[in-house]
Image: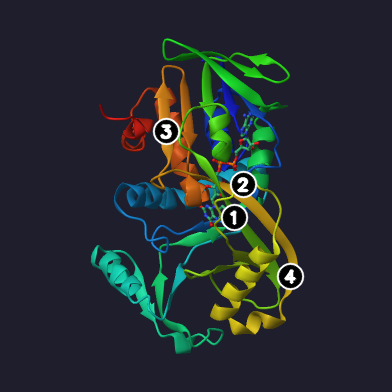
């Protein structure tokens, strides 16, 4: 195979490009704007338990979580760039009225996962609203900005070519992509991999839509690990705390809002009151690639793959999605291509 074209430079496109370049493939990444990818602003939690995922989505997410240590090791070596990656678990905060979460924790524990229940009074920072803490010991988190930087460094070292252009159409015939049309040029490859995130509808008729998320960065309180609650989550990063996130069905409306700031601040203070003295250093926003059932959407053709719709968990899903792309190019099948096939949205007659 001579040339693979990857459309999109978020975590999904770049991870696939890295795995394919490692195999010795000639890879070209075409992206409209390297800075607009949602992946730059993600919290980076690797949290299939805290997210309460179920069935196939849990299985896919959990398998990807298991791939993470090796994924980070590979990237740091390939890029020469450090990535903050923390294992050792996330605290799932349980608030009054959320006792059902404890049953879920018990269920995961019964299935053999590392789950502990911690008394809130053992944690100095927490408010009285917190009635319990579930420590999901297998979860972790990664600094998504460092991860993206590292991918870009690695790809440059592996001589992957970057082109800035917006793809407006994929010309198809007989289930194959013949060429892709950009604003600046027409591109042809031997295989095409599309990872356009929330902007998928600009190229393919798939039910992916943007779900905006705002998050803020603050300095002041150091936490030992992620505190994930239903009203906000607090992620310790080197030098600051990442506080996420809103979830807004407002299309591609840009910018950060006073309402977003209020919601994030109130949510964080209800979990850790001591944050009242923290200073805000930045506020960010991005667009989750959401789908009607909250699961990824994969489309596999003769000479192309569309890998999209990773919604709230694209950072978590990156290593397994890239592996899936690699398997497909090697000619071996992967059950998750079927599980998350776009065919589930075809109208039954
Ligand atoms: C506030 C917030 C917090 C989050 N926290 C987490 C978290 O803790 N853990 C987690 O796992 N996930 C998290 N997510 C979700 C995660 O960020 C996304 O699932 C993930 O970034 C999607 O990656 P992607 O590569 O599919 O898309 P993106 O990162 O958005 O990249 C898409 C790329 O495609 C390019 N593109 C689009 N259309 C075209 C076109 N026509 N031509 C050329 N290029 C094109 C864009 O320019 C962009 O580079 C969070 C999201 C938000 C908003």
**Marks 2,3: beta carbons within 8 A:** no
- Whichever of callouts 1 and 4 sits on the residue coming sooner in the sequence is 1
Q: Is residue 180 above or below residue 110?
A: above
**Marks 2,1: beta carbons within 8 A:** yes
Q: Decide: few, some or many residues near mark 3? Use Cα within 10 Å; few <14, some 14-19, many ≥20.
A: many
- Whichever of callouts 2 and 1 sits on the residue coming sooner in the sequence is 2
Element carrying mark 1: strand
Q: Nearer the viewer, residue 313 or 224?
A: 313
Q: Position of residue 310 (x, y in %)?
A: 48, 44
- Whichever of callouts 3 and 1 sits on the residue coming sooner in the sequence is 1
Q: Nearer the viewer, residue 145 or 166?
A: 166
Question: Which residue in the structure is indicated by mark 1?
Answer: 213
The residue drawn where x is 70% and y is 38% is 34
- Spatial CA distance of label 4 from label 2 is 21 Å
Element carrying mark 2: helix
Q: Nearer the viewer, residue 42 or 285?
A: 285
- Residue 280: numbered disc: 4
- Spatial CA distance of label 1 from label 4 is 17 Å
Q: Nearer the viewer, residue 103 or 303?
A: 103
Q: Position of residue 125 (x, y in %)?
A: 56, 84
Q: Decide: few, some or many residues near mark 2? Use Cα within 10 Å; few <14, some 14-19, many ≥20.
A: many
Question: Which residue in the structure is indicated by mark 2?
Answer: 38
Element carrying mark 3: strand
The residue drawn where x is 42% and y is 64% is 50
Which quadrant of the view contains residue 236? bottom right
On screen, residue 35 versus residue 236, left or right, reads right
- Spatial CA distance of label 2 from label 3 is 19 Å
**Marks 3,4: beta carbons within 8 A:** no
- Whichever of callouts 4 and 2 sits on the residue coming sooner in the sequence is 2
- Residue 298: numbered disc: 3
Task: Respond yes or no on whether mark 1 lies under 8 Å from ligand 1.
Answer: yes
């Amino acid at each position: 195979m001579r040339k693979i074209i990857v459309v999109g430079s978020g975590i999904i496109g770049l991870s696939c490009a890295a795995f394919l370049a490692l195999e010795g493939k000639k890879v070209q990444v075409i992206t409209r704007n390297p800075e607009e990818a949602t992946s730059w602003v993600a919290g980076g939690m690797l949290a299939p338990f805290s997210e309460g995922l179920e069935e196939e989505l849990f299985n896919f997410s959990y398998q990807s979580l298991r791939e993470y240590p090796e994924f980070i090791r590979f990237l740091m070596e390939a890029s020469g760039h450090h990535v903050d990656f923390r294992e050792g678990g996330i605290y799932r905060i349980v608030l009054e009225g959320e006792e059902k979460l404890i049953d879920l924790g018990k269920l995961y524990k019964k299935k053999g996962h590392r789950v502990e229940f911690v008394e809130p009074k053992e944690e100095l920072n927490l408010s009285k609203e917190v009635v319990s803490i579930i420590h999901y010991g297998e979860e972790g988190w990664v600094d998504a900005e460092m991860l993206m930087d590292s991918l870009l460094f690695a790809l440059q070292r592996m001589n992957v070519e970057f082109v800035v252009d917006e793809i407006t159409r994929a010309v198809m015939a007989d289930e194959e992509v013949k060429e892709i049309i950009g604003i600046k040029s027409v591109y042809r490859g031997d295989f095409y991999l599309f990872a356009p995130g929330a902007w998928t509808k600009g190229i393919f008729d798939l039910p992916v839509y943007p779900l905006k998320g705002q998050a803020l960065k603050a300095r002041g309180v150091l936490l030992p690990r992620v505190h994930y609650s239903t009203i906000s989550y607090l992620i310790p990063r080197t030098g600051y705390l990442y506080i996420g996130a809103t979830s807004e069905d407002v299309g591609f409306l840009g910018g950060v809002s006073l309402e977003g700031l209020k919601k994030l601040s109130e949510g964080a203070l209800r979990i850790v009151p001591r944050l009242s003295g923290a200073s805000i250093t930045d506020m960010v926003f991005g667009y989750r690639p959401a789908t009607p059932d909250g699961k990824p959407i994969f489309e596999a053709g003769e000479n192309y793959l569309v890998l999209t719709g990773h919604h709230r968990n694209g950072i978590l899903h990156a290593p397994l999605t890239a592996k899936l792309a690699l398997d497909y190019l090697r000619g071996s099948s992967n059950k998750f291509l079927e599980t998350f096939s776009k065919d589930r949205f075809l109208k039954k007659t």
